[in-house]
Amino acid sequence: MTVSAVSLAAADLAALARAAEETFPDEACAILEGTVTGTVVQVERVHLAPNVAADRRLAFEVDPRVLLRLHRELRGTPRDIVGVWHSHPDGNATPSATDFARTYDPSLAWIITGVTGAGATASRAFRVDSVAFAEVALTERRS
Ligand SMILES: [Zn+2]
């Protein structure tokens, strides 16, 4: 499955931007729960998770307990883990080499929010191609 677009509620996007600001200068992270219709990822819930990376200013690693709990919760439901979100405290919402090295599931959508001491800068969505990230449309829903 190739992701062409990622859709999430404006309130969820705002919550992610807030988490990025509150966690600055560390990277914040979250798991995205939702559904996939065709090639469009619909995010229905965001689950902020502790960043358990050794150096949280330069990387993120979602607490595996959050992942495990979610996998259990969503088993047998129409929803699934559809993506991952994290912040970049250098203000740049572009995947880093570290991010690419850590991709493990090409079906997951990635959203990155840039943040500086002055606040969140931008949020962008990506899919993982075999050799790189490719930007896809990020749209805000009203609900
Ligand atoms: Zn990153």
Image: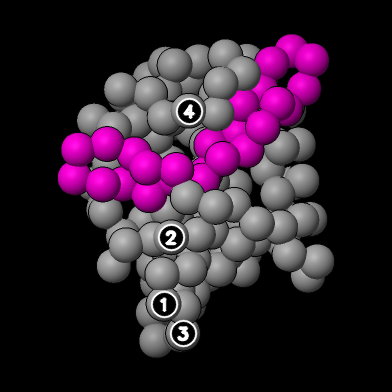
Magenta span has 138? no
Query: Mark 4–mark 1 contact, CB under 8 Å?
Result: no
Label 2 vs label 3, nearer the camera: 2
CA separation, marks 2 and 4? 17 Å
Pointer 3 residue: 78
Q: Quadrant of residue 119?
A: top right
Pointer 2 residue: 4
Q: Residue at x 44, y 43 (%)?
A: 135
Label 2 vs label 4, nearer the camera: 2
CA separation, marks 2 and 3? 20 Å
Mark 4 or mark 1, earlier in chain: 1
Query: Mark 2–mark 3 contact, CB under 8 Å?
Result: no
CA separation, marks 3 and 4? 31 Å
Check disc 3 and give the amino acid type: Pro
Query: In which quadrant is the C terminus drawn?
Result: bottom right
Q: Residue at x 29, y 67 (%)?
A: 1
Q: Taking 54 as reference, is 93 left or right? A: right
Pointer 4 residue: 94
Check disc 1 and give the amino acid type: Gly
Disc 1 is placed on an element classified as loop
Q: Nearer the viewer, residue 1 or 50?
A: 1
Disc 3 is placed on an element classified as loop
Check disc 4 and give the amino acid type: Thr
The location of residue 140, given as percent across then percent down, is: 71, 57
Q: Which residues are magenta?
A: 111-135
Q: Residue at x 45, y 74 (%)?
A: 36
Q: Check disc 4: other Cα within 10 Å, few if <14, some if 14-19, many if 20+.
A: many
The location of residue 112, given as percent across then percent down, is: 53, 37
Disc 2 is placed on an element classified as loop
Pointer 1 residue: 38
Mark 3 or mark 1, earlier in chain: 1
